[in-house]
Image (spheres, coloured by chain):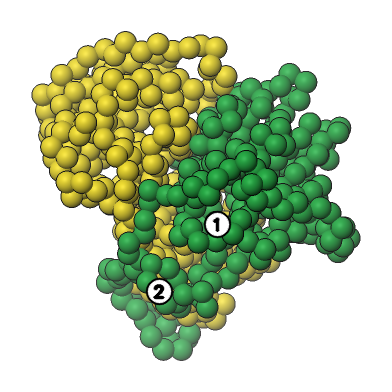
Chain colours: A yellow, B green
């Protein structure tokens, strides 16, 4: 019992990047445990997905052809059955919205210790150690897991994708799905955030975050966007507050943008936000907190009060 | 119908802080209601306002200090509250997902709600797992990361939208009883009114010990141990402009103009 089982993720016909990253983590851990890396590919075009995931480090791929899209009741049942058959020491799932929709249920049902949102995983031969963030990324912790078997969900984009082809065995796994226990129905998908502006097309984005404090203060960043002939975007809290529509949101659950200049005003740079803008050519941060993670990826920064800097900047372009 | 809303008092860290061993020095922590749970409370209260005969019960796991947090839920419209605590929990270094699952499952068995609303995650330890784990433990249906909810109470179905990555929402029907983990932005949480705050003083907060819940002290035992805590290395190679706001704005303006911005 030293194998590793990782569960691939796909949506609307496409494997998601995290699936290739799971192969990287999985083969690292399997090397350390001395066991095999197994992948479970569940629902959708399992043959095509299995083919794509036949990568270096993968020993066996188990496919379960059941339905087109993710359904947590199906996933929970099937992952439990594959787990029982493979009997691994470590179960790896993505820490995605769907991963969080079955991982904790599976861990509870199988009585596995669950560690979520790992950004690092090490195995020293006997103990698994995970690196996790706490307090919105202000600190990192090293967490030791003193359990025989453990389920870990991994954060996306923390490991490189494995791309080299492999020679895994691919076999259909004979799972039994109890349809009476499937008490949820996925009816469809909807793209959100259409509307007047496409922020992904903008060359210059003035982006505003929680630091703006009040809705009335948005006029200040609107004025800056006008002065720079830029488009206004925002981080999540501004949209949550209803101050800007969803089509302006940059980040994991919003849009991914790659402008020439991204000017982040009062944005701390939480990982979910950074996922949406790290590809910008030039990143400018204006934030009072010198330790804010936005400065880790910024090219230029002003550690000062936005309410003083932004008017001065408007003056520079309009004065 | 009965709606159970789980809330957590979380610690936020000041910009400047010190780490003491494997925890943040208490002096730099400020306690508040978890942001996600504020939306869960609002969703529960809105259900009680739009449907007949709905009781909203709020539950928290926490020491006496956390009564302040649970009073906020009461002031915003929850009908009554349950606070789970025990001397034996005091010494636990961390309550992991399994421990919280088992504690809350005992409350669910006691209260028998039709719907459980929890926040997607807690702002401090950020596991994001307790709601779905709880659903499995008590045999409820569930949905994670819900940003829209319509209830068909008679039909026993919750129609939800799950906020997936990349601006895509999944439309899903789940049978009741269910646990839904609530995402920020699903509603606009109200501020507690003065009247609400006054009323909250008279509402019941029922303390429950492990004994009351039929649990033993080993519920808090964890296989997880935090062995190190540190500030992540900053890898900043940003050019930081220094000086008065006029000076820094001037330097930034030069960079922007060189890049063709505002020309």
Q: Chain of mark 1?
A: B
Q: Nearer the viewer, mark 1 or mark 2?
A: 1
- The image quarter containing residue B5 is top right
Residue drawn at x 54%, y 41% is: B101
Of the image marks 1 and 2, the number of the one nearer the N terminus: 2
Residue A77, position in %: x, y?
43, 21
Q: Quadrant of the N terminus of chain A?
A: top left
Residue A158, position in %: x, y?
29, 49
**Image side of residue A6 versus residue B115, left or right:** left
Label of residue B88 in the image: 1
Work out whether residue B235 or residue B244 is closer to the camera in this orientation and state it. Answer: B235
Characterize the local packing of mark 1: few (<14), some (14-19) or many (20 or more) Cα atoms within 10 angstroms.
some
Figure label count: 2
C-alpha span from label 1 to label 2: 25 Å
Whether B132 is drawn above or below B27: the answer is above
Decide if residue B258 is in sight here: no
Mark 1 touches mark 2? (CB < 8 Å):
no
Whether A67 is drawn above or below B164: the answer is above
Work out whether residue A101 or residue B228 is closer to the camera in this orientation and state it. Answer: B228
Q: Chain of mark 2?
A: B
Residue drawn at x 34%, y 68% is: B230
- Label 2, on which residue? B19
Characterize the local packing of mark 2: few (<14), some (14-19) or many (20 or more) Cα atoms within 10 angstroms.
some
Disc 2 on helix, strand or loop?
Answer: strand
Disc 1 on helix, strand or loop?
Answer: helix
Whether B122 is drawn above or below A291: the answer is above
């Amino acid at each position: 019992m030293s194998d590793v089982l990782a569960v691939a993720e796909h949506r609307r016909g496409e494997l998601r990047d995290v699936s290739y990253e799971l192969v990287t983590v999985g083969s690292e851990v399997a090397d350390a445990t001395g066991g095999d890396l197994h992948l479970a590919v569940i629902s959708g075009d399992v043959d095509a997905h299995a083919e794509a995931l036949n990568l270096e480090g993968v020993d066996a791929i188990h496919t379960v052809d059941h339905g087109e899209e993710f359904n947590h009741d199906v996933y929970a049942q099937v992952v439990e059955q594959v787990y029982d058959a493979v009997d691994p020491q470590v179960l790896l799932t993505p820490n995605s919205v769907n991963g969080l929709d079955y991982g904790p249920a599976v861990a509870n049902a199988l009585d596995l210790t669950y560690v979520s949102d790992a950004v690092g995983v090490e195995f020293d031969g006997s103990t698994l150690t995970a690196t996790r963030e706490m307090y919105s990324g202000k600190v990192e912790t090293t967490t030791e897991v003193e359990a025989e078997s453990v389920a870990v969900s991994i954060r996306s984009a923390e490991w490189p994708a494995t791309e080299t082809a492999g020679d895994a065995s691919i076999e259909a796994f004979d799972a039994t799905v109890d349809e009476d226990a499937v008490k949820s129905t996925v009816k469809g998908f909807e793209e959100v955030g259409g509307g007047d502006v496409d922020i992904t097309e903008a060359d210059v984005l003035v982006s505003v975050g929680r630091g703006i404090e009040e809705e009335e203060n948005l006029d200040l960043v609107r004025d800056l966007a006008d002065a720079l002939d830029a488009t206004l975007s925002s981080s999540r809290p501004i949209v949550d507050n209803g101050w800007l529509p969803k089509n302006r949101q940059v980040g994991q659950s919003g849009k991914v943008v790659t402008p020439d200049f991204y000017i982040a005003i009062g944005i701390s740079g939480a990982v979910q936000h950074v996922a949406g803008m790290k590809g910008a050519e030039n990143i400018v941060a204006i934030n009072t907190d010198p330790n804010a993670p936005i400065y880790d990826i910024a090219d230029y920064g002003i550690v000062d009060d936005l309410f003083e800097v932004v008017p001065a900047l408007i003056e520079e372009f309009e004065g | 119908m009965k709606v159970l809303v789980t809330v957590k008092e979380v610690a936020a860290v000041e910009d400047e802080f010190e780490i003491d061993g494997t925890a943040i020095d208490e002096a730099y922590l400020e306690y508040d209601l978890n942001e996600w749970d504020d939306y869960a409370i609002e969703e529960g209260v809105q259900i009680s306002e739009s449907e007949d005969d709905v009781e909203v019960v709020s539950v928290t796991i926490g020491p006496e200090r956390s009564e302040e947090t649970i009073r906020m839920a009461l002031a915003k419209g929850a009908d009554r509250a349950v606070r789970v605590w025990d001397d034996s929990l005091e010494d636990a270094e961390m309550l992991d997902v399994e421990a919280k699952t088992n504690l809350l499952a005992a409350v669910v068995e006691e209260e028998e709600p039709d719907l459980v609303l929890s926040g997607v995650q807690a702002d401090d330890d950020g596991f994001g797992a307790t709601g779905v784990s709880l659903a499995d433990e008590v045999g409820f249906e569930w949905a994670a990361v819900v940003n829209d909810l319509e209830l068909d109470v008679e039909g026993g179905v919750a129609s939800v939208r799950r906020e997936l990555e990349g601006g895509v929402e999944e439309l899903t029907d789940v049978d009741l009883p269910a646990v839904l983990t609530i995402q920020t932005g699903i509603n606009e949480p109200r501020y507690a009114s003065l009247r609400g705050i006054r009323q909250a003083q008279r509402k019941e907060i029922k303390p429950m010990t492990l004994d009351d819940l039929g649990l033993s002290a080993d519920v808090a035992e964890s296989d997880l141990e935090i062995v190190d805590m540190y500030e992540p290395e900053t890898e900043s190679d940003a050019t930081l402009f220094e000086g008065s706001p006029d000076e820094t704005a001037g330097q930034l303006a030069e960079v922007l103009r060189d890049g063709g911005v505002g020309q």
